[in-house]
Each structure stands twice: as structure tokens, then as C-alpha cells.
Amino acid sequence: MIPSLFILMKRFHEIFFDFSFQERLIGIKNAVKLFFTNPYGVGINQSTLFLDNVSEISLLPWQYQPVHNLSLLLMSETGILGIFSAIFILGIIIKKIKNIPKNNEKIIFYLLLIFLLITAQFDHFLLSLSQGRYIIILLFGLIFLSQPKTANTYYKNPVVQ
């Protein structure tokens, strides 16, 4: 019991005092400061240009990168309007998933959305890389395509008798 506790404590120490973890904390702090100094955002893909203005330490060249948290990245780059827009779009997506008639599809889409939201808390690739944007567009497109068809959505071809 004691050796496993020692190993656990050692691992805890390694995680929270690791250099990469400290860099991520600096990125989080800079993103929050950037939002409070520019509440309307600095522009999409522009947060790295403003890091010198908010950073307490002198950044090395490899430290000029977006924060590894999509919520904070949206908050610092698009500001209040962007955050409210993202929440609104997420609400529409959840409402669309609720309206899917097949339970299997509904569960799959909920799981995919949860996976993307969890992933977004640890990396910024969904917004900053083309492949991430393609994943979001593909998921949202599939959700919108799996909606039930109503009578008004079908093309009515008059049958000549």
C-alpha cells in the first residue's frame, strides 16, 4: 500500500510540475488576460500576435502558440459575441440531436459531441487546423442530414394520369 501511494504521489508531482504543464498554465493565464483587456476579441487566429501585450514573462519563440483550450481560445479571439454565438450554435445542435427519431443515431451523435467537447478542453486543433474544422463540419452536417423528413421537404412531382 505504501509503495503504491509513493508512486502515485511521485506521478502527481511529475504531472503538475512538468514544464509542458506549466506552459499550458501560462497559456491559460494569457488567454484570460487577453479576454479581459479585449472583451470584444482580437480577431480569429490573432491571439498569438497579442501575447506580448499580456504575458508577465518574456516568451520564447516556441511559446507563441494558441492556448490549448478551445473555449478560452474562442473567448480571447472572438470575445463576448463569439462565446454567445458558440453557445447558441451548440444549443441548436443539441436541439437537432434531440429531434432525431432513431435512438441509435441519437446516442452516437451525443457521444461524438461529448468527445469533441472534451477534446476541445485540451487542444485547439478543432478551430486552428483545417482538419479540425472539417471534423466539426462533418459532424454538424451529419446531424442536420439525419433529421426526419416532413411532408413539405419532399419534392412533389405531379403525376399525369
Image: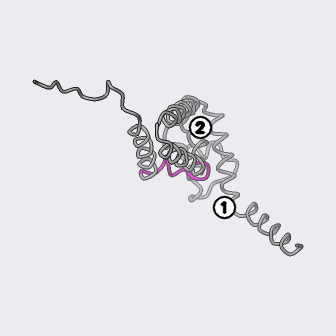
Instruction: Residue 73: name its quadrant.
Output: top right
Q: Residue at x 76, y 62 (%)?
A: 17
- Residue 61: x, y in percent? 56, 58
53 left or right of 45 in image:
right
**Badge number at residue 75:** 2
Region in magenta: 120-130
Give the camera-side residue of 98 and 23: 98
Q: Is residue 16 above or below residue 150?
A: below
Q: Residue at x 61, y 52 (%)?
A: 122
Q: Are marks 2 and 1 in contact (CB under 8 Å)?
A: no
* Residue lying furthest front: 161
Instruction: Look at the image and tell me in which quarter the C terminus lies.
Output: top left
Give the camera-side residue of 12 and 101: 101
Structural crowding at the residue carrying mark 2, measured as other residues with C-alpha within 10 Å and reported as few (<14), some (14–19) or many (≥20): many
Give the camera-side residue of 71 and 110: 110
Structural crowding at the residue carrying mark 1, measured as other residues with C-alpha within 10 Å and reported as few (<14), some (14–19) or many (≥20): few
**Badge number at residue 63:** none
Q: Is residue 77 above or below residue 13?
A: above
**Badge number at residue 20:** 1
User: Could you tell me the amino acid type at mark 1?
Assistant: Ser
* Residue lying furthest left: 161
Residue 124 included in the magenta stretch of the image: yes
User: Could you tell me the amino acid type at mark 2?
Assistant: Met
* Residue lying furthest bottom: 3
Residue 113 included in the magenta stretch of the image: no
The tag earlier along the polypeptide, 2 or 1, is 1
Q: Residues under labels 2 and 1: Cα distance?
A: 22 Å
Q: Residue at x 53, y 35 (%)?
A: 94
155 left or right of 77 in image:
left
Question: What kind of element bears circle 1?
Answer: helix
- Residue 76: x, y in percent? 59, 39
